[in-house]
Amino acid sequence: LDELSDNKHKTNIVDLYCGVGTIGLSMYANDNYIVGVESNREAVLNANRNAVINSIVNARYFYGRAEDVLPRLIADGIDGFKVEKIDLMVVDPPRAGCDKVLLDTIGQIMPKSIVYVSCDPATLARDAAILCGEYGYKLERVCPVDMFPGSLNVEVVVRLSKLDFNAHKRLN
């Protein structure tokens, strides 16, 4: 994941559907700030514990649905905390993929890069098509991971990067 994230110069990481914070915390560097969002209250408590156990003070986890919490974090903030700039967004949604409202919010925020982890290649393809087609991202890397040998299931991790608009103008 670290190789796919290209996390050398990232300062603000948002980890959606973060569970207990494993992916975002694994990308921590001294200057990172990690914000996680998860709809399982106990997982949020454990994510905060994991940050403390690993001596990571720049991590904050919020309880709620990603499509509800992320827009509030950007617009108004929660409990006095507001995300103003996002360098890297990590998305690890359930099999159904991301809600369209969430994809639109991500597209409006325009993080420099997105690492999308998926257990369903079909919903990954649908969501990546929206991010690339409507919001100017480019699919840069794809890495299938066979976490369940002997089954037909595969995890797929992709990196999407924001295109430089001036360098990649579309001609109609």
Image: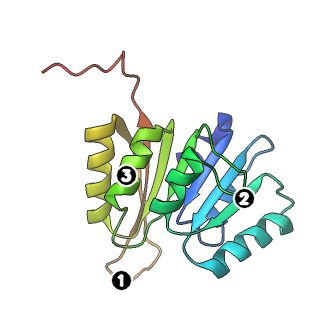
In 3D space, how far apart are the residues under numbered discs 2 and 3 (Cα atoms)?
22 Å
Alpha-carbon distance for marks 3 and 1?
30 Å
Instruction: Give amino acid for label 3.
Output: Leu
Mark sitting on residue 151: 1
Mark 2 vs 3: CB contact within 8 A: no
Image height check: is 1 above or below 149? above
Left or right, residue 116 beside residue 34: left
Quadrant (top left/top right/bottom left/bottom right) for the N terminus: bottom right
Task: Reply above or below: 93 against 133.
Answer: below
Residue 13 is situated, as x and y percent measured from the top left of the image, at 63, 47
- Res 27 seen here: no
Q: Which residue is labeled 2 in the image? A: 60
- Looking at the rendered structure, the secondary structure element under dot 1 is loop
Image location of residue 165, percent across then percent down: 36, 21
Amino acid type, mark 1:
Ser
Counting residues from the start of the chain, the first of labels 3 and 1 encountered is 3
